[in-house]
Amino acid sequence: MHNNDGSTIQDSQLNTLNDSPARNTLSRAVVTQEVTSHGGDQNRKTVLLIDDDKDMREIGQKIIGAASYNFLEAANGKDGLAMILKHRPDLILLDYKMPDMTGADVFHELVRSPLYSTCSETPVIMLTAKAEYDVDRNHLFEMGLSAFLVKPFGPRELINVIDNVFILHQVRQKNRELEQRIRRTEYKYQDLIENANDLIFTLSLKGDFIFINRRLLTLTGYAREDWIGRSFFELVYEEDRPLAEEQFGINLHGKARIFEMRIICQDGTILHLSTNINPIFEKDEVIGSVGIARDITQRKNLEQKIMELKNFNESIIQSIASGLITLDLDNRITSFNSGAEDIMSYQAVEVMGKYLYDVLPMEECRLLLPDFGGEYSPFNREMAITVKNGKSVYIGYTIAPLQDNNSRRFGTIISFRDISEIKQMQAQVIRMDRVASLGVLASGIAHEIRNPLAGIKTMAQNLEEELPRNDPRLEYTSRIIRQVNRLDELLRTFFTYARPQTPERKFHRLQEIVKEVHTLLHNRLMASNIEFIERYANDLPLVVVDSQQIQQVFFNLILNSLDAMARGGKLEIAANAKTATLYAIDRRRKRSPKTKTNSTYVEVNVSDTGEGIKEENLEAIFNPFFTTKPQGTGLGLSIVQRIIEENEGEIRVKSELGKGTTFTILLPTEE
């Protein structure tokens, strides 16, 4: 017997004859034999028997019905075709020899006529009483005949053939469905490969293209037919070929590789591809490679633009003089620009990733960082912070939240600048305001104070002359006169500060000015065990000052140093030429050069090894009436600063408690 798929079942397997010697008809006695039930499927299959022999149809009904199949019958080919269309049986038993239409005619009509196209796959078993060589079985099997059964045959033989045909038909249907599914899958994946957005290709062991999908044309403008058989490396940009060859070599050793490369298009443009190549194995041997390459040119261009924008922003951030620090939500430092490095004396690598309270004292962090609750807008504040060297720097700062595109805060921005100089300017403006107020005050009360003092002094002197020499009351008059003289001296000092005389500036040697002062104070310096040192540069230029006023400056500074070195010490005056620009500050805190830019000055440093000045007092020592001495007037250093300014110079101070103080004076050398 032959199946539709071309396989053959030998007739000897199907044709097991019964014990009856008659071969022309099937003996009725066989109906009484035991018939094995082949039920079990609740959906009973239908078998149609087409045979002109009525006895054969009756016997077939009993055999097939006993085997739990539904039975249909037809007496000729024409009726059988009608039954097929009407009932669509699951299997057809077809007698080969019938009048009018033979079984072969019915089978031909069933297979080839479009009318029966929906039933053309129904399995057909041909029944014949003729010998094997009298029927053209090969032709029928080629058309799709399922089996050939020669009469006579026993009931069990018929049912076995029917069962086997059903099983073979079911297997054939499943195989057909599987083949269709495989074809659909092949078409699907072929379509996916051909229409993929990625370049997909296979390479030989030499690196030549074996297959390339359609994407090559849209990416590069090259027809894939032109590249089949050509080297993959010819497509790669020359500078990237060594990398591609290296990765391909590793791939041939069985390792998948992912790398980026550039390829040259037909029009000369260059594309960036992210390429994934995997080895193709056959019997554990690599026979080639399959590659998938994705166009990442747009991403690379975007990355380049982002990098350029990042560098641009970074250069702006790094170039600004203000400090800029960013923190994450845990207050870890995420950026630290060069301005912050200059102000805080830290390098970025020292603080990146650290908590802010690892860099600044905890109390300063609490004052610096606000609570970002609810609505928030940036604000400006001022405070002193402690930098790396322990020095306190006054900053003006702005705090703002660092937000993403959805306005969600993910950090903090701290922008700040060193305003220590501005604070000094503010103090200088305050001092200027005080000086102006003192000038007005001095003009108003000068006569009101000095006239009564003159009267008191005159009366005391007259009383002193009238009293006898041994009168104890003379002590009272002497004290009155001394106190009046002290008040008069205080007023003169006050007037000197409030209304200084216009300096008569001339060229002088600084050494001579200092020598005059040293002569006056030499004995006191020796008595106080003070070592006096003078150091002058060889090319020290002349200074343009009022010598008398500058002598008063050095006189006051040396006296202050003497007071600071009660147990002796060292006092040094050193001078050298220096180029600088001095600025004046008006009441609106605007700076303007006092002299022409980069003028030459003589820088004089008056240094002692005394007890020093407290840091909190350094900004106040030039203020009028500020003093730490019990009997001091608080006008000495104020007068010094005023004289220096009137002589177009500048004075600054540095001091360290317990180590000493240095006053730095700039004196002009040009008119």
Image (cartoon, rainbow, N blue to C red):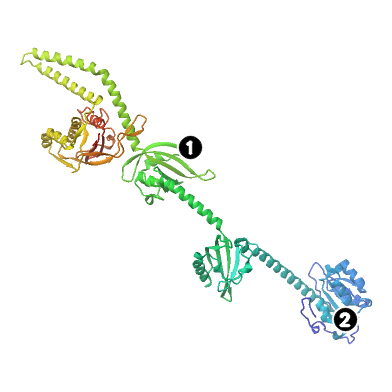
In the displayed structure, would residue 24 be above or below residue 491? Answer: below
Give the quadrant of the C terminus: top left
Q: Quadrant of residue 599?
A: top left
In the drawing, what numbered circle is on residue 128?
A: 2
The reply, left or right, for residue 475 in relation to residue 204 is left
Q: Position of residue 69 (x, y in %)?
A: 84, 71
Q: Nearer the viewer, mark 2 or mark 1?
A: 1
Q: Which residue is mark 1?
A: 377
Q: Position of residue 277 (x, y in %)?
A: 56, 67
Looking at numbered disc 2 in the image, what kind of residue is underneath it? Thr
Residue 422 or residue 157, whichever sits in front: 422
How many dots with numbers? Answer: 2
Task: Looking at this view, name the residue that lies furthest to the bottom.
Answer: 21
Which class describes the residues within 10 Å of circle 2: few (<14), some (14-19), or many (20+)?
some
Q: Is residue 86 visible?
A: yes
Looking at numbered disc 1 in the image, what kind of residue is underneath it? Ser
